[in-house]
Amino acid sequence: MIIHQHGRLRALAEDGRWPELLAAYRQGRAAAVAEAGEEAAAVLTAPLGHLIAYAAPPELAVRLFDRDGGAGTAAGVADHDAGPLWEVLATRHSWLRLAPLLGPVPVRRLVAHTRALLGEDLSYGAESDPEGVPLRLEPWEAAGWDEAARVREYLPGGGARSALLTLPASREGLGEVELPPVARSAGRPDGPPVTRALEGLGALAPWAETACVRGQAPAAAALLARDRRVVGGYLPFALVYPALVRSAALERAQGCAHGRLGVWRALAAMAGADGLDGSDGPDGAGAAGGVDRGEVNALVDRMRCFTWQEPSAGLHHLHVVLEDPAGGVSWVVSGSQDL
């Protein structure tokens, strides 16, 4: 098995013998699938997959995902080591290099959104996103974090560095706030857009609680905060957005592209919930079939974001309310996780 040939495979990599390494990856993965199943095979072959995705020429690295080697030989979107193999690949080469080479549609889409997160403008010349998510960052997406911190920093021998998910990160700009008493069953709107928004936020942070209330941000925070008196305050959405994107990438099988797509889905559903009448609006904003860029940008422009500290926050934590003043509704996400 591949795991027992570590030294030999590294020697092949140092000599640039990438076709042999790809053949070893495919043979090892197919054998592991036959012996232990798809999930186990992905784990066993991930270190070699990482090495190829990181260091091989793009013409060969993209073949990790091609099915021309036969059953069980190709990596899928969930194959990961320190992170998804497609994300490793996307951090190493521009879309200009990768676009003519990448075959599988799911991989192409995730790589494209990773390159967009890293600052590439793919709005011209690339196939449009099936959900209508733009292939270049909106100004509010780029404003709150450095380009180098938007995706994990992968290391050549395996492993990765990534920024901690902490919202709020400190007490700076926050103060003592008395949250209002709110009954958990009171003022909770429903309807398809609200449901989709909550599902979207839950997918972003499956380790956190989510809720929606009719009212302002402090009332929503009161649903999930442990204490009535908290250290909290308002932040611009541009500073909240990075934490939402990162929340989806805490699991190694998920990449930051998953987070970006998830945020856009959730925002589109929130925009469709304006008015709380249970409909998606005359233009389909927030509908399940896609996003309306104009509606999402308008929502972000008017949104108010409230965050607060919890006394026993985990290594990764997210405590935030997204309030739409026009719709009179607030969505809250709160949770922490130690990995």
Image: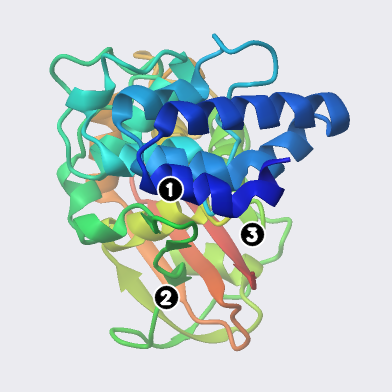
**Residue 275 shows in the view:** no
Task: Measuring from the top left, give residue 249's x and y in whole percent.
Answer: 51, 51
Residue 187 against residue 87 in the figure, above or below:
below
- CB under 8 Å between discs 1 and 2: no
Q: Which mark is residue 68?
A: none
Labels 3 and 1: the sequence-earlier one: 3
Q: Which mark is residue 208?
A: 3
Q: Amino acid at mark 2?
A: Pro
Q: Quadrant of the N terminus?
A: top right
Q: Residues within 10 Å of mark 3 (few under 14, many from 20)?
A: some
Secondary structure, mark 3, is loop
The structure residue drawn at horizontal position 36% and vertical position 77%, both measured from the top left corner, is 233
Q: Which mark is residue 168?
A: 2
Q: Is residue 14 left or right of residue 337?
A: left
Q: Which mark is residue 328?
A: 1
Q: Amino acid at mark 3?
A: Ala
Give the quadrant of residue 54: top left
**Residue 13 shows in the view:** yes
The structure residue drawn at horizontal position 45% and vertical position 57%, both measured from the top left corner, is 157
Q: Foreground mark, 3 or 1? A: 3
Task: Measuring from the top left, give residue 112's x and y in whole percent.
Answer: 31, 28
Query: What's the CA distance linking mark 1 and mark 2?
Result: 24 Å
Q: Amino acid at mark 1?
A: Gly
Q: Residues within 10 Å of mark 1 (few under 14, many from 20)?
A: some
Labels 1 and 2: the sequence-earlier one: 2
The structure residue drawn at horizontal position 38% and vertical position 48%, both measured from the top left corner, is 14
Along the viewing direction, whichever of 41 and 204 lies nearer the viewer: 41
The structure residue drawn at horizontal position 77% and vertical position 32%, both measured from the top left corner, is 32
Secondary structure, mark 1, is loop
Secondary structure, mark 2, is loop
Query: What's the CA distance linking mark 2 and mark 3?
Result: 15 Å
- CB under 8 Å between discs 2 and 3: no
